[in-house]
Image (spheres, rainbow, N blue to C red):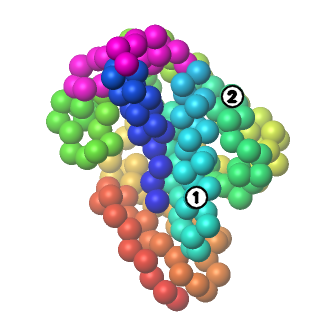
């Protein structure tokens, strides 16, 4: 189950638009929006956790929670510590210039519901902080997370290289978590999953 915080941000944006308010968001091109009041980002993560908790009651479900933040220490504080304990963390690294180029390419020629537009101004002003030192040292200590549950993937190469790194991480996860019951095979780039019984 893929849960993306953009869905919740978009709902808040549409709600503001219906009430002719523009103090939390402003519209941008390709049907996108920029965030003006960054407290909505914390609210969106709280909604992500609530949705995930609903699905956690289903047996053998793999949940993928997707979000990007300028400060992951603050972002992770929006989740209950117990919620994070059994989680795996996957961070993608790419330069701001590459992220901006990819956002424009995906937004002008969308191929999935997940191809959202974020303006260059928003990306450069909000995502300029380097989180790498925090990711590698403090995340583990703050939540008692094993370094085996954290991976940083370099996302500056080809789609094929990215998928190979992603498959390696997911296979490691499946190998660790598989207990002879039902599990899900992840297939990057296809947007689907198949369930098998061992």
Q: What stretch is highlighted in magenta?
A: 19-38
Is 36 covered by the magenta stretch? yes
Q: Is residue 133 above or below residue 179?
A: above
Q: Earlier in the sequence, mark 2 or mark 1?
A: 1
**Crowd around label 2: few <14 · some 14–19 · many ≥20 (10 Å):** few
Q: Where is residue 71 in the image (x, y as percent from the top left)?
A: 63, 26
In the rendered structure, the answer to whether residue 159 lies left or right of residue 186 reads left
Instruction: Tell us which disc is closer to us: 2 or 1.
Output: 1
Q: Where is residue 50? Give x, y as percent.
A: 60, 48
Identified at 64% across, 81% down, the residue is: 179
Which residue is painted at 57% across and 70% down in the image? Answer: 58
Q: Is residue 173 above or below residue 12?
A: below
Relative to 59, is 99 above or below? above
Q: Residue at x 66, y 55 (%)?
A: 87
Secondary structure found at label 2? helix
Q: Are marks 2 and 1 in contact (CB under 8 Å)?
A: no
- Residue extending furthest left? 109
Q: Picture coordinates of residue 165 (x, y %)? A: 47, 54
Q: Name the residue carrying label 1.
A: 54
Residue 72 lies left or right of residue 16; in this view the side is right
Query: Measured from the top left, where is residue 77 in percent x and y?
Result: 72, 35
Numbered tag placed on residue 11 in the rendering:
none
Residue 74, disc: 2
Q: Is residue 111 left or right of residue 123?
A: left
Which of the 4 image quarters holds residue 118? top left
What is the secondary structure assignment of the residue under circle 1?
Answer: helix
- Could you tell whether 169 is left or right of 27 in the image? right
Residue 172 figure quarter:
bottom right
Q: Nearer the viewer, residue 189 or 184?
A: 184
Badge 1 local density, few (<14 within 10 Å), some, or many (20+)?
few
Q: In this view, does 195 lie above or below 88?
A: below
């Amino acid at each position: 189950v893929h849960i993306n915080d953009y869905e919740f941000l978009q709902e808040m944006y549409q709600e503001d638009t219906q009430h002719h308010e523009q103090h939390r968001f402003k519209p941008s091109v390709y049907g996108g929006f920029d965030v003006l009041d960054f407290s909505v980002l914390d609210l969106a993560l709280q909604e992500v956790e609530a949705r995930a908790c609903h699905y956690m009651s289903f047996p053998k479900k793999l949940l993928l929670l997707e979000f990007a933040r300028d400060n992951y220490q603050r972002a992770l504080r929006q989740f209950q510590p117990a919620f994070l304990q059994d989680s795996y963390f996957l961070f993608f690294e790419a330069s701001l210039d590459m992220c901006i180029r990819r956002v424009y390419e995906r937004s002008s020629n969308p191929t999935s519901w997940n191809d959202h537009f974020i303006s260059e101004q928003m990306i450069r002003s909000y995502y300029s902080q380097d989180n790498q030192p925090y990711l590698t040292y403090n995340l583990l200590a703050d939540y008692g997370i094993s370094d085996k549950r954290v991976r940083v993937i370099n996302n500056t190469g080809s789609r094929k290289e990215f998928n190979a790194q992603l498959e390696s991480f997911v296979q490691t996860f499946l190998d660790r978590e598989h207990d002879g019951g039902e599990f899900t095979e992840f297939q990057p780039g296809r947007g689907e999953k198949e369930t098998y019984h061992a």
